[in-house]
Image: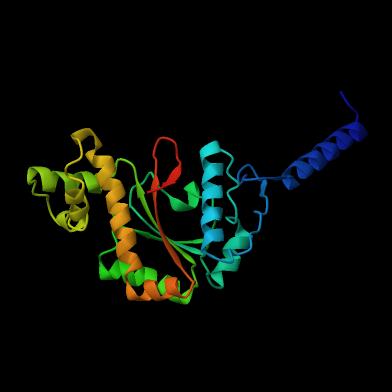
Amino acid sequence: MPDGTSRRRFVTGGLAAAGALAATTLPGTGSSGLAFAESPTAAPPKDADEALARLLSGNQRFVKGKLQNPRRESVRRTEVAQGQKPFAIILTCSDSRLVPEVVFDEGLGDLFVVRVAGNTGSDPLVIGTMEYAALNFGSVLLMVLGHEDCGAVKGAIDVVTKGTTLPGEVSAVTQPIEPAVRAVQTQPADQLLDAAIRENITTTTRRLGQVATFAQLVQDGKLKVVGYEYLLHSGKVTAA
């Protein structure tokens, strides 16, 4: 048995070691008493091309499993509580498998995300929400982000090709997508869904580019409107 002096030294040394461990900063660790590392800072993109490049670079990290999980700690939370300046507006689907901040490896306050099943931009409420961001926060990029195997597009296909009547207000979701389905209706059955998804993205992107507010910002070089598709299996975002 150690004597009293040895025992005190053992306990003191153990506490010191535990204190050193607790003070250790590990990236992305928020449990077991370990502190979060400060996320890497990033200057706001100077234009839409730089903004798009940043998103695609973050998506590459996501695909490779090398996420930085930036700007998600308490310091960033305190910072954005004073005001927001998201550099990009993302109009995307409500699908639970697609979370823009994750697939682009961005943090709090970086993206202004608008979600509606089928990622359509025909509803004035949706358009107005995005206009608000473009006009008030100076977002330089508007991305329409659809995704593989979209249920809303499947519903629109059933309406167009089978005359299906959808329950409740679900038809309000599919109606804006139906013209895109009709535009590619001659595609082989096994290719129709993918073609309709891409056509819906393209149609929505074009429609938003014609909205007066966005058209003026595009003309002034302050905004770019683009369409992309998220692939569920690979996690990759590709131009539609």
* Res 202 → quadrant: bottom left
| Residue occupying image coordinates x 56% and y 73% | 82
Q: Position of residue 229 (x, y in %)?
A: 38, 47
Residue 83 against residue 34 in the figure, above or below: below
Residue 43 against residue 148 in the figure, above or below: below
Q: Nearer the viewer, residue 37 or 218?
A: 218
Q: Position of residue 122 (x, y in %)?
A: 25, 64
| Residue occupying image coordinates x 40% and y 35% | 233
Q: Nearer the viewer, residue 3 or 31?
A: 31
Is 182 positioned to the left or the right of 71 in the image?
Answer: left
Is residue 108 at least partly visible in the picture? no
Residue 206 against residue 5 in the figure, above or below: below
* Res 77 → quadrant: bottom right
Q: Nearer the viewer, residue 165 or 203?
A: 203
Rendered-image quadrant of the N terminus: top right
Is residue 61 at least partly visible in the picture? yes
Q: Position of residue 153 (x, y in %)?
A: 23, 47
Residue 111 against residue 81 in the figure, above or below: above
| Residue occupying image coordinates x 60% and y 53% | 70
Look at the image and name its color scheme: rainbow
